[in-house]
Image (cartoon, helix red, strand yellow):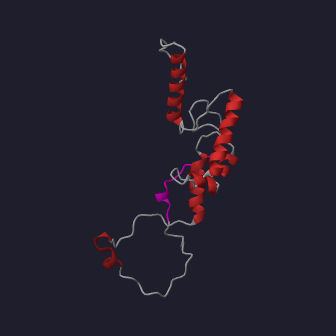
Amino acid sequence: MYKDTKLIFEYTTKTKPNRLIAPIDVEKADLASFYGSAYKEELPDIPDLDEITVVRHYTNLSNKNYGVETGTYPLGSCTMKYNPKINEDMASLPGFAMTHPLQPEETAQGNLELLYLLERNFCDIFGMDKFTFQPSAGAHGEQTGLLLIKAYHEDRGDTKRRIMIVPDS
């Protein structure tokens, strides 16, 4: 069910108090002297909403999105493909997600082993000698694929191909 959605700034906050923290008896700091000319006396126009209003607002907006969880979308290079939720769980493990490309090789052996084993499995499955994870996604992956196709045909002396069939949405 979709509702007409107001902008988050259009919700009124005048009738609902939203204070979870009791007033404190600490001396007020002189912020103007601390921040100088950057200090503004008037408050910014930020909605002061209770949590449930914010959650409902953004949940309603998210329900308007179209994605692989709600239907089929046959085109797209990466963003509309379904990835099992467990993939996100595995990719976000701290030992994997927090790896830095410039960290010492000896501290990334587990990740390197995972990538090596995945590469070997893909080679076995697809009957290839080598496999790359280098193209990030989207257009980068598509360009890499096209360059591989071009190199394949050039290696066989087939240099006259100039037409490619591309699906159109």
Viewer-closest of 5 and 39? 39
Q: Which residue is depicted at the point 54% across and 72% down?
A: 18
Residue 34 x, y percent position in the rendering: 33, 77
Q: Is residue 15 left or right of residue 96?
A: left
| Image: magenta residue range | 1-12
4 magenta-colored: yes
Q: Which residue is depicted at the point 62% across and 37% down?
A: 81
Q: Which residue is depicted at the point 56% across and 66% down?
A: 50
The reply to whether residue 67 is in sight is: yes
The overriding secondary structure of the stretch rendered in magenta is loop
Q: Which residue is depicted at the point 53% across and 51% down?
A: 5
Residue 107 x, y percent position in the rendering: 60, 55
Q: Is residue 113 left or right of residue 37?
A: right
2 magenta-colored: yes
The reply to whether residue 164 is in sight is: no
Q: Tell me the quarter of the image containing the C terminus.
A: top right
Residue 2 x, y percent position in the rendering: 60, 46
Viewer-closest of 68 and 113? 113
